[in-house]
Image (tube, rainbow, N blue to C red):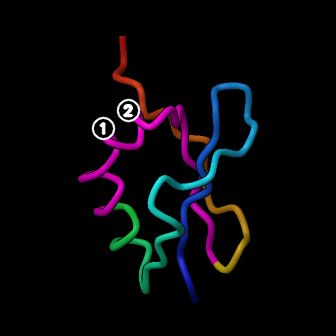
Amino acid sequence: MVWTWRFEKADGSSVPAPDGTEEFPTQGDAESWIGEFWKGLLDAGIDQAVLLDDGEKVYGPMSLHDAE
């Protein structure tokens, strides 16, 4: 199992990861990573993220914007 994030604009179009694709051995590792780096991703023009397990969608899109 390889856990990754797919990054998107608000309209659902894909956005390349600013520093290349990160791969994680567990779902928890992937979720911890995005919890630490979401602000930088938002600053890079990414609006939302989708969690993938071996390329299959687990959940998302999850907004990176603060709740209003």
Residue reaching furthest top?
Answer: 68
Residue 35 drawn above or below residue 55: above
Residue 63 lies in the magenta-colored region: no
Q: Quadrant of residue 11?
A: top right
Report the amino acid beneath label 2.
Answer: Asp
Element class at badge 2: helix
Segment colored magenta: 32-53
Residue 22 drawn above or below residue 51: below
In percent of the image, x 73 and y 70: which residue is there?
56
* Image disc number at residue 4: none
**Contact flag, marks 1 and 2 (Cβ < 8 Å):** yes
Q: Residues within 10 Å of mark 1 (few under 14, many from 20)?
A: some
Residue 33 lies in the magenta-colored region: yes
Residue 59: image location, x then y, percent = 61, 53
Q: Which residue is mark 2?
A: 43
Report the amino acid beneath label 1.
Answer: Lys
Q: Which residue is mark 1?
A: 39
Element class at badge 1: helix
In percent of the image, x 58 and y 89: which residue is there?
1
In percent of the image, x 40 and y 68: which residue is there?
30
